Amino acid sequence: MTTPYDLIIIGGGMVGASMARALSGSGLRIAVVEAWPVDSVRQPSYDDRAIALAWGTRLILDGMGVWPLLAADAEAIRHIHVSDRGHFGFTRLHAAQLQVEALGYVATAHAMGQSLLKDLEAEPGIQLYCPATLENFSVGERKARVRLSLEGRPLELESTLLVAADGGRSAVREGLGIEVREWGYGQTAVISNLTPGIEADGTAYERFTDQGPMAMLPLTGGRYGLVWTLDDQQVDQVLELDDQSFLARVQGRFGQRLGRFQKAGKRSSYPLKLLRTKEHVRPRVALIGNAAHAVHPITGQGFNLGIRDVAVLAEVLSDAFRAGRDIGALDVLEDYARWRRRDQQAVALMTDGLVRLFTNPLLPVRVARNLGLLALDLLPPAKRLLTRQFMGINGRLPRLSRGLPLDR
């Protein structure tokens, strides 16, 4: 027997769970398929990584009703300090200049998972299949069908729309043969949480070094989340260092702005690439999050880009459903794809361009980028435009991105 739904979301990580939350109470019948148990410490989407949340993302979470569950575990970013190690260029961004309480926030992926998944199945119209693996699927003219293995038992579901939120190695995307443009950077991000030597003041740091950019993101409890980009051949050596040697290496690259680092948490790593799909939708199928795109973490845009996909797709589907339209029809889904195209392209170009600019060793390029940083610091209109892009509040905004529920 096949169980019918309006929407099947493959992937219950941060983006997939956000999609379900956004559409709860819309009247749509939603199934969420997730391979890991929701309380598993091995769930890669909900580990202890520091996740940068743009101001626009906070508004989306507010509109979804999730922010009150997360607020106590999210540290505000009130200032951003950008510098080029060993050179004169720097720029500073301040929340007060934009008359907002914060430029963004930082929370661990674990805290995000607890907030997004809390009582998820109690939300109207949502059924969670977990742990379940996708065995195969098919897309027909009117329905998409999936076959799952749920704790070893076969199960079949069908829906009007299939949403792929299953990450950079999306089984749905690959099964459909959707073409991907992918560039490897030859770099890997090393992740850890550190205890600084001085009290945090809500400042996030982006420090460009000759070994790759290093971000320090303020976390609750006085900690900082480290995202350190290294060439692939350096990673194993850094991961194998004892804690004191690791802290000394980080200190040498970052400097003394946070005093002397006292303690390092667990280290992990993931390879970096730029990934963009040539299609974001097909009849009965939509791709969101890393299934559709992946960017360098240089400005912390990854999850923010994915949740903006959620905000737009949720609005398009909710409006179509209320109007009696077929939510899996290509003309409906193309509304989502067109709306998201400009933001996705802008973030991909910005992050890729910054990586190439700040890894270029040529003297004229170094001088030009440092002059650019100083000029940005001295030109409020340019700084405001760039800051609004980082905050996720540029361009046409869906209701959730304005902090409003879908039914407004």
Image (tube, rainbow, N blue to C red):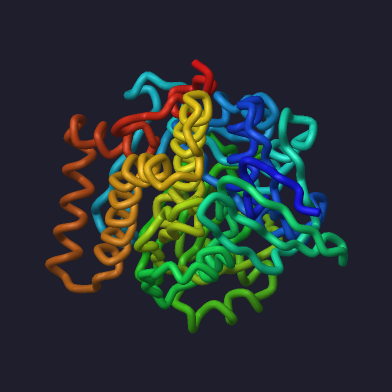
At 49% from the left edge and 22% from the top edge, which residue is drawn? 403
Q: What is the quadrant of the N terminus in the image?
A: bottom right
112 left or right of 96?
Answer: right
Image x and y of residue 283, in percent:
45, 53
Between residues 347 and 51, which one lies in front from this camera angle?
A: 347
165 left or right of 96?
Answer: right
Q: Is residue 79 visible?
A: yes
Between residues 162 and 49, which one lies in front from this camera angle?
A: 162
Q: Is residue 195 visible?
A: no
Image x and y of residue 268, in percent:
64, 66
5 left or right of 213?
Answer: right
At 51% from the left edge and 54% from the top edge, which residue is drawn? 141
Between residues 143 and 148, which one lies in front from this camera angle?
A: 143
Quadrant of residue 255 within the rendered picture: bottom left
Counting every numbered tag in the picture gives 0
Image x and y of residue 198, in percent:
58, 42
Between residues 246 and 334, which one lies in front from this camera angle?
A: 334
Image x and y of residue 385, in percent:
24, 34
62 left or right of 244?
Answer: left
Residue at the bottom extreme, as displayed: 233
Residue at the right extreme, as displayed: 152
At 28% from the left edge and 49% from the top edge, which residue is drawn? 346
Quadrant of residue 42 within the rendered picture: bottom right
